[in-house]
Amino acid sequence: MYRKLILDNGVRLVTERMPALKSVTIGIWVNVGSRDEEAGEEGFSHFIEHMFFKGTATRSAAQISREIDALGGEMNAFTTRETTTFYVKVLDEQLKPGLALLSDLFHHSRFPAQEIEKEKRVVLEEMRMVQDEPEEWVQDLHTQQIFGAHPLGRPILGKPATIRNLDRRDILGYIQRYYHPQETVVAVAGNFDQKQLLSLLDAYFGRFERPAASKRNRWPAEIHGGLQVHEKQLEQAHLCLGLKGISVEHKDRYAAALLNAVLGGNVSSRLFQEIREKRGLAYSIYSCLSAYSDGGMWSVYAGTRPSEAPTVIELVSKELTRLCRKGIRRDELARAKNQMKGSIMLGLESTSSRMGKLAKDELHHGRRVSLDEVMAGIDRVSEAQLIGLSRELFDRRRLSVAALGPVSRRSLSSALN
């Protein structure tokens, strides 16, 4: 059973009771992410997410860790380009102490100066770790390339110099600017007593007050094409190819998801079958959509032998052209629809994923999007709609390619002509 309540201070509560389960997940979603940082603040959103776990007025960082372990639960946080999320998952009988712990972190974290200095070293190590993961690093490089100087192009982790220089005043100022009741959604999914839950949520969030929130300065990004090569001694060449995508609220969002499934979203997809199964050119090959509130990007990743990198780029380009010219077979579309519906339904069997859907629906659409509505939206997608969308988005003249590994610009340029 779904419920939505807006507290007097503007905090939005969205809940879904799942009585057949024995767990409950609570998430606090703040409508601010890396794209909202000003110049000189790169990485603030992510760093602040770390700092919420470093002690409150009544709990040390060690006590927080011991307490969540004693509950037998899981507590964590994550930052995206548009949101920052804190969550706890516990057994249903531990709802009250789990919520008390999570709300204490959110409202009463102290951000001790000594902990900030320690966490700087942790985040700088996290940045180094990304650079030791070429599949992840090339996607960061490609995002920077395709969005250019737009804030969406920034790495979520930020810049080393910015992290080294931030201090406690920066953290408190950023929170004061963006962490406001009107920008906060609390989502809860699992087994709980509705009356008790709403009473707890009102007690923990009803008195959450701050001055009026600063307006986020968001604007659509322009997509940049071209080729960028980052030479590095690796065993593989890691490739990212990208094009314009669509926003999370776009009328063609179901069509785009199906088009992605056909192109490279699963093991029966065209790219997986052609590049891995038929030719053996890659172990990892896939496509994905990154959708934001006002636009997005479409990307393909492949890791291959350096000598085969031009061939992989050519094959991806040819598949994009083939989709535009010939569209999708009826049986291919039917298979993609079944796969997508099954993936959505199976993915929502956990309280964590259901909590995430509740929050995203509220942030993106201002309402719950029912599963029946999602399934109907998928079923309505036609072959004609897909070919029209592919022709709108798959413009090879705007194709961007980022390559990381022992490859040269000259070796790859010919593959794009």
Image: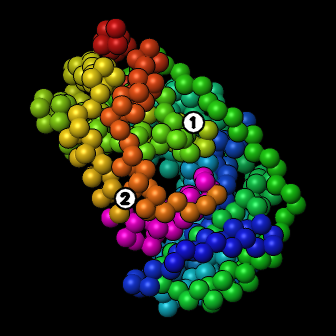
Q: In the depicted view, which residue is nearer to us: 157 or 356? A: 356
Residue closest to the far right:
211
Q: Is residue 311 visible?
A: yes
Mark 1 vs mark 2: which is more N-terminal? 1
Q: Is residue 272 above or below residue 14?
A: above
Q: Mark 2 belongs to which amino acid?
A: Ile
**349 within the magenta span:** yes
Tell me the amino acid under the disc marked 1: Gly
- Residue 49 visible, this angle: no
Q: Quadrant of residue 98?
A: bottom right
Q: Secondary structure at mark 1?
A: strand
Q: In the image, 202: left or right of 389?
A: right
Judged left or right of residue 157, residue 230 is: left
Instruction: Say whether residue 37 is magenta.
Output: no
Q: Quadrant of residue 47?
A: bottom right
Q: The C terminus is located in which quarter?
A: top left
Number of the label disc, if any, that sits on residue 295? 1
Residue 8 vertical placement versus 287 (above, below): below
Magenta range: 346-365
Q: Position of residue 95 (x, y in %)?
A: 55, 86
